[in-house]
Each structure stands twice: as structure tokens, then as C-alpha cells.
Image: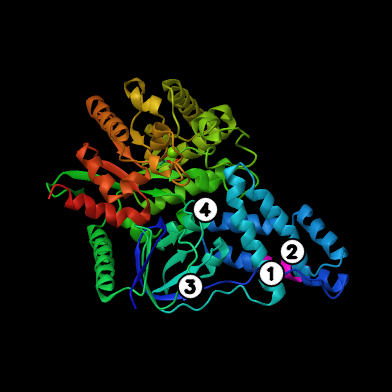
């Protein structure tokens, strides 16, 4: 049979080659009436209890990011509005399954229609919860299929908890007919290095062998021997890159011409970070401290933050760790902290929000200062637009250090730097008294080209990190840093793309920080550069 190639959207890099396993979980059977109000109420309550237990089990097994998704679902199961809605439907004579379908269906439609990205992203979590409850009530079982070695799982959609329930020892990759590259499930896949392609469209009757390219966003069904050989070669090349990387044991990384390039990693979720990756890199170039704030009703206090920062420093064992202060707002709303705004990407986000809520920033800076006694810690500010923002934080840092000294602690003053991701800052960099600059290409590209960073929708093609305006500005930033003797790095997704990384190296950039799953690739690109 001739091979069939299906193009989707890349959502998590990597190559898989293996048997296709199709999973179309139950969850959409027709509504019906039950055998009686009381019996159905008991069945509903038992299903809620089982769902809570199942979710707790998944949360224990996985990291903070997963816990955030699962906590939301667990809390939803006790939401009075949800429970009242189901009880009301049961009183009307609905079966437990029909009541769940009806009431959660209403919530899903409501969340789906929200303007706010945070609530829209939650739609996926509610669909997940509905399907779990229905599977429990209808006996369909929410357990995933057994996966043969290297399997490529094909599903219409995959919810975060179903992803977490898959056996990752045998899972090769995931192909989704629907799905989103920016949803929670894709984030979980990226953090765990599982190749993922989304948006393939309906693939009825798909079976047999398959090949998946998470970087190109391609699924090949019934691949020919030549295609198989090509995918196998690419997979071996990736494995080789990973081996070469681990042989490096933390650098130094050099181009073919012997020039040093610093390669660090971005940390979004320390619990999903492997020790081998830490050993292989030169440090953490960006710690997104948001992981501490999501999935809880109150912000973490100073002691909780201090412990988390100290523990991460200990894991990096003397390698520098660059903590970014809270960067919520925009695509990362935090209920109770970020403001409701018509245009959140252009509003109170990053350092703007921290300066508007100084009590939050002071707590974080105190925790960071205390942790600085434990290892080489750096502090980075997100979304800086004006020099005064940086100056204000530096003054606050000095004040807090004095206060800590008065309490008997004597922390060193950590280097204080800034993200370069607002075009106005990038164009006036000579005015900023920073200890280092780190280009945030995700936001810089979005603001420079006026095209959303999620890379979807009708203007997706405009989000182009290789646009001449981007390359010119990055080149200028590198130049200003060099002229002023201030280190410049780049920590956006752009550095994880081999082609873009080649251009960045041509522009003279010599320090990058990439997602852990992109580390081996970046190291190999650097090694080949100039050969
Ligand atoms: C960026 O904007 O490039 C960046 C690294 O930060 P974030 O993706 O967290 O906004
Ligand atoms: Mg950013």
C-alpha cells in the first residue's frame, strides 16, 4: 500500500516510528433517564469520589504542572454551582450520566466562549473531567489502551489526565486529529519530551505502521521502506546528539571554529526536569517562577519560595541559575492577581504587575536574596520597558538586603538583569543599567510583528522569528551588549530551532537558553556551526 502523508501542526519535537494505536475513548453516548433519583444521586456521588481518587493518584505521580491541571479538576468536583446543577437535573429524572453531560456541557460551552485565554484553556480540562466521570458512570473505563514498544498513539483529542495515564515507557509519540499546540496537554508533552503533532484532521480507518515527526508536524501512515529508513536515521541522529550531549557533561560547548557558546536550559517545572539534563547544560538561563504560583488559591509565602529556590540551586550544584520574577498576565493569567483587561498582552503584565503589587515583589525578592547565600543565583525582570522600572527594583533589592542584614543574614547582591522583549527597550538598550540582557524572542517577535505568539489563526504566518526586522534588532542588541561589556543571551523558543540558531550565531550571539527537550539539538547545531 502506498504511504499516506498527513500534515498537522508541530507541538512537541522528536521522531517516532512504530505501530499505530488508535484510541477513541468513550464519553459521548446519548442522554438518558435513570432508574430513580436517589440511586442515581448515589451513583453520581460515588463517581465523583472515584474521580477525585484517580486524579489524586495521577497528581502524586507527576510534576507541578500536572498537579495544577489536576487540582483544578479536583476542585471543580466540589464546586457548589456544578453540584447544584447536577442535583437539579437528577430531580428532573435525568440519569447520573445524562446530568453530568448536561451540566458539564453547559460549563464547557461557557468556558469555550470566554475571551480570556486562561478560561479557554480550561475548556480542555473540563472536557477531560466530563469524560472521566462518564467513563466511571457508564463503565467504559478511562484507562488507556496497552501500548506496544514505540507505539504512536492516534486519538481525536487527548486530555491532560489521559496523557498522564499513558505508559511513557512504551509510548513513542502522539498524533492528534484535533488538539492545540498551546494547550496544557502539549505543555506536558514538551516538558516530558514526547513527540506530538496536533491538528491532523479526521483520519478514519488509520492503522498499521506509522512515522511521526514532531518537529515538522508530520504523520506518515504505512511508510515505505525508504521513509522508514529516513525516519530511523533521523531518530538515530537525535539519539546520537543526546549521547554526544551527555558525553559533554555540562560543556563547554564550542563551534566548529572553537568559539565558546554558553548553552543553558529554561526551567518551567522543576519536578519534570531530569538530573541528566541538568548535568548536560551550563546552568538555568530562565526559571519561570510562575510554576510556584499556579494551581493554588494563595501566592506562596517567603519561606515556601525560599525553599523552592534553594532546592533548585542545590540541584544545579554550583551552576548559575537565573530566576525570573513573576511573569503573569498576557497568556499567563493568574486568578486573583492579574487584572481583567481588554488587551492583556498590552497591559499590566510582567514587571509592570509586580511594581503595581510591591508586596508580591518584595516577598519574592526577599526569598531570592536569602537563597542567593546558597549558590550562584541571578535575578531577571520580565517585560521591562523603561530604565526606571529596573532602577526601582534595584533600589528595592538594596533596601531588602539591608533589612535582611539587620536581621542577621548577609546575602550577596545577585546580578540583576532584564528580559529584552519589549521593542522600545530593545531599541534604547544603552539607557538600561542592567547586569545582563536576555532576549525574550517569543514576546519580542510578537510585539515587533504585531502577530500573536501562539502561532495559530489567520495571521500565524506573520509570527516569523526570521523576519529581517527581528534579525536586525537582535543584531543591534548583541552589538550594544558587546560595546558596553554587558552579557547578552537569548532565552526564547527561537534558540531551540536549528535554522534560527544558525542565524543567531551569525549575528554574534554566544549565549542561549533552551527548553530541555531542545538541548541536544542546540548543542549539535553549535558544534556544526562554521564547519
Ligand atoms: C520570551 O518571551 O521569549 C520568553 C522567554 O518568556 P516567556 O515565553 O515566558 O514569555
Ligand atoms: Mg516573554
The part of the image, by quadrant, that contains residue 502 is top left
Residue at the front extreme of this rendering: 2
Q: Which residue is mark 3?
A: 167
Q: Which residue is mark 2?
A: 100
Going by the image, does 507 lie left or right of 133? Answer: left
Give the main secondary structure, helix, strand or loop, of the magenta stretch. helix
The local secondary structure at tag 1 comes to helix
Residue 144 pos. (x, y %): 55, 74
Q: Earlier in the sequence, mark 1 or mark 4?
A: 1
- Residue drawn at 45 percent across, 50 percent down: 268
Q: Earlier in the sequence, mark 2 or mark 3?
A: 2
Q: Earlier in the sequence, mark 2 or mark 1?
A: 2
Q: Which residues are magenta?
A: 45-53
User: Could one spot residue 223 in this view of the protein?
Assistant: yes
Q: Which residue is mark 4?
A: 183
Residue nearest the observer in this picture, 286 or 163 = 163
- Residue drawn at 42 percent across, 61 percent down: 196
Q: Which residue is mark 1?
A: 134
The local secondary structure at tag 4 comes to loop
Q: Quadrant of the N terminus?
A: bottom left
Q: CA distance from mark 1 to mark 4?
A: 22 Å
Q: CA distance from mark 3 to mark 1?
A: 22 Å
Q: CA distance from mark 4 to mark 3?
A: 21 Å
- Residue drawn at 17 percent across, 52 percent down: 528
> Are the residues tagged 2 and 1 within 8 Å (C-beta)?
yes
> Are the residues tagged 3 and 1 within 8 Å (C-beta)?
no
Going by the image, does 359 lie left or right of 289? Answer: right
Quadrant containing ligand 1 reads top left
Q: Earlier in the sequence, mark 3 or mark 1?
A: 1
Q: Is residue 432 magenta?
A: no
Callout 2 environment at 10 Å: few (<14), some (14 to 19), or many (20+)? Answer: many
Residue 379 drawn above or below residue 4: above
Amino acid at each position: 500500500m502506498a504511504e499516506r502523508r498527513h500534515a498537522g501542526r508541530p507541538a512537541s519535537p522528536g521522531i517516532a516510528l512504530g505501530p499505530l494505536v488508535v484510541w477513541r475513548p468513550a464519553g459521548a453516548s446519548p442522554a438518558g433517564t435513570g432508574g430513580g433519583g436517589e440511586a442515581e444521586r448515589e451513583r453520581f456521588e460515588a463517581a465523583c469520589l472515584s474521580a477525585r481518587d484517580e486524579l489524586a493518584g495521577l497528581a502524586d505521580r507527576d510534576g507541578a504542572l500536572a498537579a495544577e491541571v489536576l487540582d483544578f479538576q479536583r476542585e471543580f468536583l466540589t464546586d457548589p454551582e456544578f453540584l447544584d446543577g447536577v442535583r437539579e437535573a437528577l430531580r428532573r429524572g435525568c440519569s447520573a450520566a445524562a446530568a453530568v453531560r448536561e451540566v458539564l456541557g453547559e460549563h464547557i460551552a461557557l468556558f469555550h466562549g470566554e475571551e480570556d485565554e486562561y478560561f479557554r484553556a480550561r475548556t480542555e480540562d473540563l472536557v477531560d473531567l466530563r469524560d472521566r466521570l462518564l467513563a466511571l458512570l457508564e463503565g467504559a473505563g478511562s484507562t488507556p489502551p496497552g501500548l506496544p514498544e514505540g507505539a504512536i498513539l492516534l486519538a481525536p483529542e487527548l486530555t491532560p489526565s489521559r496523557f498522564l495515564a499513558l505508559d511513557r515507557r512504551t509510548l513513542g509519540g502522539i498524533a492528534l486529529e484535533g488538539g492545540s499546540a498551546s494547550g496544557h496537554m502539549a505543555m506536558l508533552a514538551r516538558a516530558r519530551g514526547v513527540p506530538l503533532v496536533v491538528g491532523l484532521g479526521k483520519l478514519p480507518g488509520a492503522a498499521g505502521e506509522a512515522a511521526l515527526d514532531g518537529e515538522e508536524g508530520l504523520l506518515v501512515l504505512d511508510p515505505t521502506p525508504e521513509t522508514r529508513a529516513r525516519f530511523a536515521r533521523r531518530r538515530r541522529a537525535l539519539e546520537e546528539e543526546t549521547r554526544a550531549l551527555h558525553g559533554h557533561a555540562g560543556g563547554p560547548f564550542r563551534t566548529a571554529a572553537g568559539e565558546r557558546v554558553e548553552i543553558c536550559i529554561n526551567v518551567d517545572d522543576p519536578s519534570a526536569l531530569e538530573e541528566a539534563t541538568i548535568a548536560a547544560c551550563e546552568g538555568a538561563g530562565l526559571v519561570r517562577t510562575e510554576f510556584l504560583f499556579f494551581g493554588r488559591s494563595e501566592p506562596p509565602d517567603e519561606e515556601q519560595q525560599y525553599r523552592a529556590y534553594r532546592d533548585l540551586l542545590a540541584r544545579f550544584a554550583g551552576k548559575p541559575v537565573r530566576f525570573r520574577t513573576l511573569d503573569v498576565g498576557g497568556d499567563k493569567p493568574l486568578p486573583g492577581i492579574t487584572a481583567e483587561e481588554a488587551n492583556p498582552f498590552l497591559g499590566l503584565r510582567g514587571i509592570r504587575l509586580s511594581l503595581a503589587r510591591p508586596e508580591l515583589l518584595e516577598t519574592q525578592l526577599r526569598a531570592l536574596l536569602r537563597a542567593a547565600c546558597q549558590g550562584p543565583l541571578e535575578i531577571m525582570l520580565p517585560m521591562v520597558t523603561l530604565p526606571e522600572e529596573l532602577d526601582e527594583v534595584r533600589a528595592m533589592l538594596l533596601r531588602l538586603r539591608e533589612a535582611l542584614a539587620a536581621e542577621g543574614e548577609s546575602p550577596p547582591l545577585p546580578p540583576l538583569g532584564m528580559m529584552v522583549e519589549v521593542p522600545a527597550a530593545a531599541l534604547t538598550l544603552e539607557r538600561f543599567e542592567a547586569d545582563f540582557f536576555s532576549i525574550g524572542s517569543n514576546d519580542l517577535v510578537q510585539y515587533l510583528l504585531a502577530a500573536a505568539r501562539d502561532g495559530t489563526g489567520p495571521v500565524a504566518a506573520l509570527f516569523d522569528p526570521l523576519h529581517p526586522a527581528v534579525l536586525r534588532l537582535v543584531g543591534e542588541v548583541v552589538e550594544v551588549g558587546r560595546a558596553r561589556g554587558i552579557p547578552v543571551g537569548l532565552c526564547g523558543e527561537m534558540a531551540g530551532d536549528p535554522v534560527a540558531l544558525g542565524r543567531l550565531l551569525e549575528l554574534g550571539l554566544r549565549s542561549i537558553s533552551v527548553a530541555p527537550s531542545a538541548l541536544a539539538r542546540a548543542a549539535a547545531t553549535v558544534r556544526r556551526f562554521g564547519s
